[in-house]
Image: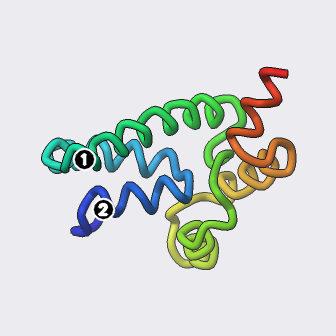
Amino acid sequence: MSTTDPYTLLLKLYSARNVGAIERLLKERAMEIIMLSESERTAVEKIEADSAIWRKIEDEHGPGAVLNLSDPLTLTVARLRGHVRLLSDEHFDNAERFTASFGTPEGYRARLQS
């Protein structure tokens, strides 16, 4: 990943709803995450819980399904698609299809509960 602090990276990845990158960062930078402040660790726990829900959605609807297509990080990655393989076309296709059908992961959960 980057030498940027893991908390800042997690916040960016969380905003983008990039499940795979969140999972990798949590694993690769676990020792640094343990050292975060109490309030930051509380935020990380929410990120972990939400990304676990998002993982289940992506397992059903395909990789990238919950990507936030309007997030600045996702938009930057989309512009680099032909040059850098950070996310595949499949990720973006799944995200577009999921967003068109359900809007957000929260919209998906609401639909399942109704």
Identify which residue is drawn at 79% across, 48% down. 103
| Residue sitting at the far front | 39
> Which residue lies under the disc numbered 1?
28
Q: Is residue 17 above or below residue 111?
A: below
Mark 2 closeness class: few <14, some 14–19, many ≥20 residues within 10 Å: few
Identify the secondary structure beneath mark 2: loop
Identify which residue is drawn at 79% across, 24% down. 112
Is 52 in front, or is 83? Answer: 52
Q: Are marks 1 and 2 in contact (CB under 8 Å)?
A: yes
The amino acid type found where label 2 is placed reads Met
Residue 97 in the image, given as x and y percentages of width and height: 81, 49
> Which residue lies under the disc numbered 2?
1
Tell whether 77 sits left or right of 94: left
The amino acid type found where label 1 is placed reads Glu
Q: Is residue 90 above or below residue 113?
A: below
Is 88 in front, or is 65? Answer: 65
Is 37 in front, or is 102? Answer: 37
Tell whether 20 sits left or right of 90: left
Residue 32 in the image, given as x and y percentages of width and height: 16, 50
* Distance between the alpha carbons at the discs numbered 1 and 2: 9 Å
Tell whether 89 sits left or right of 22: right
Identify the secondary structure beneath mark 1: helix
